[in-house]
Amino acid sequence: MYTTLIGVDIPRFGDQRRDADAQRLLRKQMYEHLQRALEISDLPWAASYVEDRGDGALILLPSEVAPTGAMDPLAHHLTALLRRSNRLASDLGRLRLRMALHVGEVQYDKHGVLGQPLTHLFRLLEAPAFKRRLEETPDADLAMLVSQELYQHAAATGLINSAAYRPINIRHKESRACGYLWLPPAYNAGC
C-alpha cells in the first residue's frame, strides 16, 4: 500500500531522571497531542495505522490521504499543542518531539509493517544530524524532517511554504540522503 509514513520520537526519553511515572506521562501527552493535531489538520487518526515504538510512534495514514497535509498544517498544529502544554512543565516533564515524514509502498504481515520506505523513515528519524539540529534549538518543542521525495513533491505542488524548510545531509547506518528540516518559525528565521 502506498502511504504517508510518520515517525515520532521523544528525545531523551531514557534520561535516568525520568522514572516510569515521567515516561508514562510523556507517552500519554505524545499520543493525545498527535491525535489532536492530526484531527485539527483533517487527517484521520481513527483510520490510521498506529504502532507504538516505546519512546515514539509510527503512524501510517490511509492511502487516500494527500501526504502534503501531514507537513505544514500538522507541524504547526502540533507545535501549538506542545507549546501550550509545555508552558508550565518542568524540564523532565517537557515533551519535545522529533518527527520524520516519508512516502512509499509498505507491506503488512502478521507482525506489523515492513518495506524500504519504513527503513528510510527511521533512518531519517534517528539521523545524528537531525538529533543535533534539535539539540541546537533547545527552545523548539518540535523538529520535523521530511524526505527529499516528499519535499520535492510538496514544493512542486505549491501546497507548502518551501522557504520554511532547510536541506540537511543525512548519514545514518547505510543511508545517505538529503532531508528537509522544518523548525517552528522563530527558529528558521535569520538575524
Image: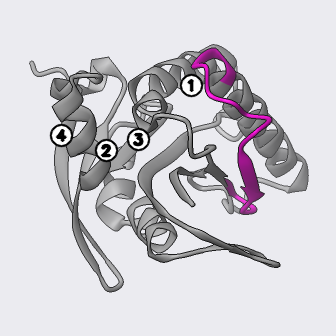
The amino acid beneath tag 4 is: Arg
x, y percent for residue 181:
28, 43
Residue 118, placed above or below residue 97: below
Which residue is under mark 2?
Answer: 136
Observer able to see residue 178: yes
Q: Earlier in the sequence, mark 1 or mark 2?
A: 1
Image quadrant containing the C terminus:
top left
> In this view of the protein, which residue sits in the foreground, 63 or 27?
63
> Where is mark 4, residue-wise?
166
Disc on the earlier residue, 2 or 3: 2
Q: Residue at x 80, y 35 (%)?
A: 46
Dot 2: what SS? loop
* Disc number placed over residue 144 in the picture, else none: 3
Q: Which residue is mark 1?
A: 78
Q: Amino acid at mark 3?
A: Met
Range covered by the magenta-colored residues:
39-57
